[in-house]
Image (spheres, grey):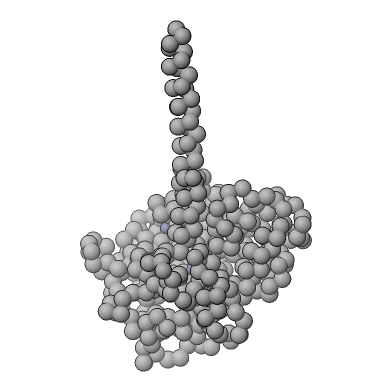
Amino acid sequence: MAAAGILFYPLTALLLSLLLLSIFLVPSSAFPIPPAGNQWQIFQNLSGCLPGDHNPLLPNLKSYFQRFGYLPSNISNFSDLFDDGLTSALLSYQSNLGLNSTGFLDQSTLSLLTQPRCGVADVIHNSTSAAATTRGRHLYSYFPGRPSWSPEKRVLTYALTDTSAVSIDVPTLRPVFSRAFARWSAATTLNFTEVPSNSDGEIDITIGFYSGDHGDGQPFDGKLGTLAHAFSPTDGRFHLDAAEDWVAVGDVASAGSDDAVDLESVAVHEIGHLLGLAHSSVSEAVMYPALRPKTRKVELVRDDVDGIQQLYGGNPSYRDAAPTGTSSRETGGAGSAAPLPEEKTAPLVVAAALGLALWLI
Ligand SMILES: [Zn+2]
Ligand SMILES: [Zn+2]
């Protein structure tokens, strides 16, 4: 009996340790997905919350800022205090999104925080604010290392590889993406050709609709919230949240649903990421991260065109884009124009990798 007891105790301890360890080894993407609906609407309740205040919604706000690159990815428990870290994240967010840098949760900031947006982070880790200043007057940005498609490759292929999760049929989807690609090829030396989804090894860009956790560590969150994400060159993955009320045909502004999202607008934005553009601070630019429901924004503006032509050169027959009224204001931290040592870097993947590494420690 004594021998069995001695054996039993270490076994129990070992099993308990393994159980505890398994809890911490679960990747972040396996955690419960937030409930459907616009979970960021609650930020409106932070109206009047000031530095030094405690508020039960502040941990949510800090998680939001962490997700989009404004707070370090190695923090897992946020306090409910409006602390200095939150103020500096807020200032950076306001600067990157073209708001007045007040450091306060003013109404225009709260309104933007509640809007649906792209899932790609605004501040890409490993970039430096010093590098960002090399953009001069330009408010577009690139991913760290400024990845782009090879100069030898001027025709990129794309395919609709996963559309089963969305109720819109492929013949309806196809012209939407075709028009979205055409807007970028009109401004550059690039061309895009759709190929069948079974063209193994010949597809540069894959487009798919997914729900919730879909295996890349960036789960979708139901209606509104994040709408889509895409990876920087030469990854080629473009994912859309299947839960959105996508409008592929007709005027999105007159759609029946208040949550309707214009598919072509999101496609034009995400293709910018696939080609190497990160987010812009110019609210009129298609590369601006937020998009209100029932809004259509498909025309490249000067800022988008300047950014993409820096990477691929201009199409001589391209008619000039509408001016954007860019100011000389600098935005620190939103990507980098200077070469950095990283190879291909996908947005958020850096942050996700850091987060996962932390879980493993
Ligand atoms: Zn984006
Ligand atoms: Zn994805």
Q: Which residue is nearer to you in this view: 23 or 212? A: 23
Residue 184 locus on image (x, y percent): 39, 79
Res 256 visible: no
Residue 164 image-quadrant placement = bottom left
Front residue of this view, candidates 331 and 56: 331
The answer to whether 33 is drawn above or below residue 151 in the figure is above
Which of the 4 quarters of the picture holds residue 241? Answer: bottom left
Q: Can you tell which quarter of the image residue 259 is in?
A: bottom right
- Residue 87 in sight in this render: yes
**Looking at the image, which residue is at 55% across and 62% down?**
69
Name the residue rendered at 59%, 55% in the picture: 63
Q: Residue furthest top?
A: 1
Which quadrant of the picture is home to ligand 2? bottom left
Q: Residue at x 49, y 45 (%)?
A: 361
- Above or below: residue 97 compared with residue 46: below
Image vertical order of residue 295 relative to residue 14, above or below: below
Does residue 96 sit above or below 201 in this rendering?
Answer: below
| For residue 91, side relative to residue 36 (left or right) | right
The location of residue 41, given as percent across then percent down, is: 63, 58
Total labels drawn: 0
Residue 208 on image: x %, y %: 37, 60
- 128 to the left or right of 58: left
Which residue is depicted at the point 72% across and 66% down? 104
Image coords of residue 58 (percent x, y): 68, 54
Is the N terminus in the top left, top right, bottom left or bottom right quadrant?
Answer: top left
The answer to whether 35 appears left or right of 277 in the picture is right
